[in-house]
């Protein structure tokens, strides 16, 4: 049974890192959390806040609309599984979220990424930087952003989106940080740098990003209908800052820092759909791309920013 209120948020993707992160930040502010999931009851996680679980699939427009009835916010924290089927599944899922938000009068929270840029983009990007994707996934992500903007300007759907770099943090398992740079977490034997020396890269500590979303929600009545802002996060300007932070946190004996063997992705790609998809985005590790958060700071003050060593320690800690 639904127990909706003006302080209820529907989280699509609560069992994923970004959905859980934003839900946690909102729950700490007194929001009631509702979630739509395909998981059976015995497969749903026990969380530190109460969750009103609804059974259903985000690809089912009726299920999303029903779950969204009476909510004030919808967190679109879902992506196609296996890093595949971005156009086939990603666009319909977002279309269902938009339709449900329009019907419920809810604001959509959307985590945007840097896929919409390219190797020709400037080193620092802000909310006005032209979006010039050259990859398939980048073009789909641009379509998603355009869908949200069109929904805001023509259909009255309010949107709050933050553009962030690569995620890392507690519980973030499907990430370059967890799977490549510090594979094995606190037990990692080798630390990998992913960029050549001197190439900068943007990282987003997930709890900080979630807190930034929550602060924008606190001020949502003051925002334009469509708000999409860069989140600065942790800017690794040298290409080694993040790896050196991992090395320091892991302590003695110091783990060696070595270059990531990108050739292994090429060798494995013919046998792995995931690797083939990942190869398309390797341009992000070959050029400096950092995020200018000036516009965000004008709205919320200083961006939430956990010190890097503390953030890395949390990201490396074993999870239950």
Image (cartoon, grey):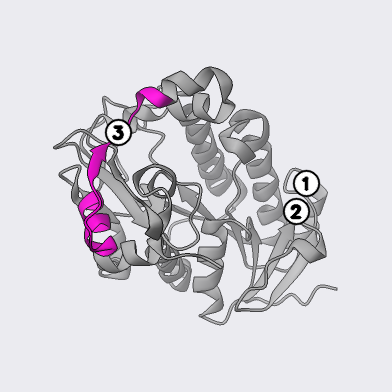
Q: Which residue is mark 2?
A: 64
C-alpha span from label 3 to label 2: 36 Å
C-alpha span from label 2 to label 1: 5 Å
- Quadrant location of the C terminus in the rendered image: bottom right
Q: Nearer the viewer, mark 3 or mark 1?
A: 3
Task: Identify which residue is drawn at 48% across, 27% down.
Answer: 139
> Which region shows up in magenta?
242-264
Q: Position of residue 5 (x, y in %)?
A: 70, 77
- Residue 308 seen: no
Magenta highlight on residue 319: no
Q: Is residue 141 left or right of residue 252?
A: right
Task: Identify which residue is drawn at 27% across, 56% down.
Answer: 246
Q: Earlier in the sequence, mark 3 or mark 2?
A: 2
Q: Which residue is mark 1?
A: 61
Q: Quadrant of residue 65?
A: bottom right
Q: Secondary structure at mark 1?
A: helix
Dot 2: few (<14), some (14–19), or many (≥20) neighbours within 10 Å? many
Q: Which residue is mark 3?
A: 285
């Amino acid at each position: 049974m639904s127990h909706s209120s003006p302080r209820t948020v529907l989280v699509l993707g609560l069992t994923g890192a970004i959905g859980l992160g934003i839900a946690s930040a909102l729950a700490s502010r007194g929001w009631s959390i509702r979630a739509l999931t395909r998981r059976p009851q015995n497969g749903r996680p026990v969380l530190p806040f109460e969750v009103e679980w609804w059974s259903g699939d985000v690809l089912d427009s009726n299920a999303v609309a029903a779950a969204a009835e009476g909510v004030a916010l919808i967190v679109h924290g879902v992506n196609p599984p296996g890093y595949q089927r971005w156009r086939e599944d990603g666009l319909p899922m977002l279309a269902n979220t938009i339709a449900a938000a329009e019907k419920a009068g809810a604001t959509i929270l959307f985590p945007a990424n840097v896929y919409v840029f390219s190797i020709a983009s400037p080193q620092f990007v802000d909310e006005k930087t032209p979006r010039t994707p050259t990859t398939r996934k980048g073009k789909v992500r641009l379509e998603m952003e355009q869908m949200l903007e069109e929904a805001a300007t023509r259909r009255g759907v309010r949107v709050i989106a933050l553009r962030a770099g690569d995620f890392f943090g507690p519980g973030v398992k499907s990430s370059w940080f967890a799977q490549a740079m510090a594979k094995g977490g606190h037990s990692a034997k080798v630390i990998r740098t992913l960029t050549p020396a001197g190439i900068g890269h943007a990282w987003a500590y997930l709890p900080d990003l979630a807190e930034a979303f929550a602060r924008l929600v606190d001020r949502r009545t003051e925002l334009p209908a469509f708000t999409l802002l860069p989140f600065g996060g942790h800017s690794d300007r040298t290409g080694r800052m993040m790896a050196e932070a991992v090395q320091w946190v892991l302590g003695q004996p110091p783990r060696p820092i070595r270059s990531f063997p990108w050739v292994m992705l090429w060798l494995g790609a013919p046998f792995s759909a995931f690797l083939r998809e990942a190869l398309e985005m390797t341009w992000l590790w070959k050029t400096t791309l950092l995020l200018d958060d000036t516009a965000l700071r004008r709205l919320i003050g200083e961006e939430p920013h956990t010190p890097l060593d503390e953030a890395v320690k949390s990201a490396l800690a074993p999870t239950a």
